[in-house]
Amino acid sequence: MRKLLSIVTVLGIASALPHAAAASPEQDLKEMRAHFKKQFPNVPFEEYGNGVYALDPGARAQWEAIEDFPPYELGLENGKKLFNTPFKNGKTYASCFPNGGIGIRQNYPMFDTKKGEVVTLESAINACRKSNTEEPLKDGKGDMADISAYMASTSRGMKMHIVVPNDPRARAAYERGKQHFYAKRGQLNLACADCHISSAGKHIRADLLSPMIGHATHFPVYRSVSGALGTLHARYEGCNTQVRAQPFKLQSDEYKALEYFESYMSNGLEVNGPTTRK
């Protein structure tokens, strides 16, 4: 509890970055990159996918040592096995995705103009299961995180390419995610932007706050505090809980929109998940 209360003292400021709803996604992306270029002039753009390890050399050395023998290896193997295991009807996940589901992570989340909604990789995985008369998987961790992690691993090195099509519904979803990112919430009255824009690079006790660009590149993530791979929406749930806000349901429209916005802000960075974090 004391750790949570200390956040108010450290982060009692609003984001310095303008976020008028009238700005286009392209302009938002340009301004976000310019902001962090000014804030961290010695950090190359391509490093932002490494989160706090782009800012702290000591922590980076420890992280790289962990990555030599990644603790998520068993989860990754399980994800590969599940991805290639036929459903009861004989089909596999590969039948549901472009290119057999290999090397496509960089395109998610995407806006489905036929359905008029944001589709995350995890929601697409469950849609695949449903179309093959299989029960949906629970989001957050377990088999869902493992399958998503395997699919992400086949896209390593490919650059994030999130598209906001010329469709008012897509723009509305993007703006919804943007508004969510900047909105104050919870008993601590904090926004995502307070931690990951205004205070990026600062410490909350022993924890260094990461810049928001790059957040979407490395999930699912193996967190040492949970001892398992977890999806990006599981992390959103954790953040909401930490600021004493009521979390939304995983794969809710709110979290899908937030992922859409954050992923667009990571465009041009390489997919580098799964990976580890504290």
Image: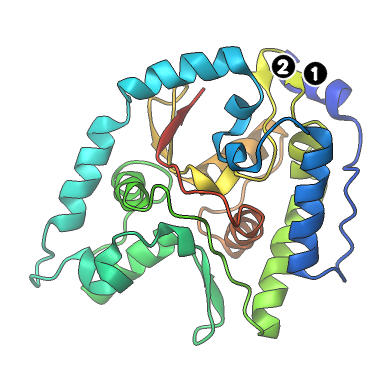
Crowd class of label 1 (few under 14; some 14 to 19; many from 20; radius 10 Å)? few
| Residue at screen point 74% across, 19% down | 203
How far from the left and from the top, in percent, is residue 79?
24, 46
Residue 97 visible? no
> Residue 40, relative to residue 66: is it above or below?
below
Determine the secondary structure under disc 2: helix
- Look at label 2 and name its amino acid: Lys
Q: How is the image coloured?
A: rainbow
> Residue 165, relative to residue 12: is it above or below?
below
**Residue 59 as seen in the image, left or right of residue 225:** right
Q: Mark on residue 73?
A: none
**Residue 199 as seen in the image, left or right of residue 119:** right
| Residue at screen point 37% across, 53% down | 155
Residue 25 visible? yes
> Residue 271, relative to residue 13: is it above or below?
below
Determine the secondary structure under disc 1: helix
In the rendered image, the quadrant that contains the N terminus is top right
Displayed quadrant of residue 273:
top left
How far from the left and from the top, in percent, is residue 264?
63, 60
**Residue 42 as seen in the image, left or right of residue 39:** left
How far from the left and from the top, in percent, is residue 248?
61, 52
The residue carrying mark 2 is 3
**Residue 174 as seen in the image, left or right of residue 238:** right
> Residue 171, relative to residue 230: is it above or below?
below
| Residue at screen point 12% across, 56% down | 85
| Residue at screen point 45% across, 42% down | 272
Q: Mark on residue 6?
A: 1
Displayed quadrant of residue 196:
top right
- Look at label 1 and name its amino acid: Ser
Give the CA distance from mark 1 to mark 2: 5 Å
Which residue is nearer to you in this view: 277 or 135? 277
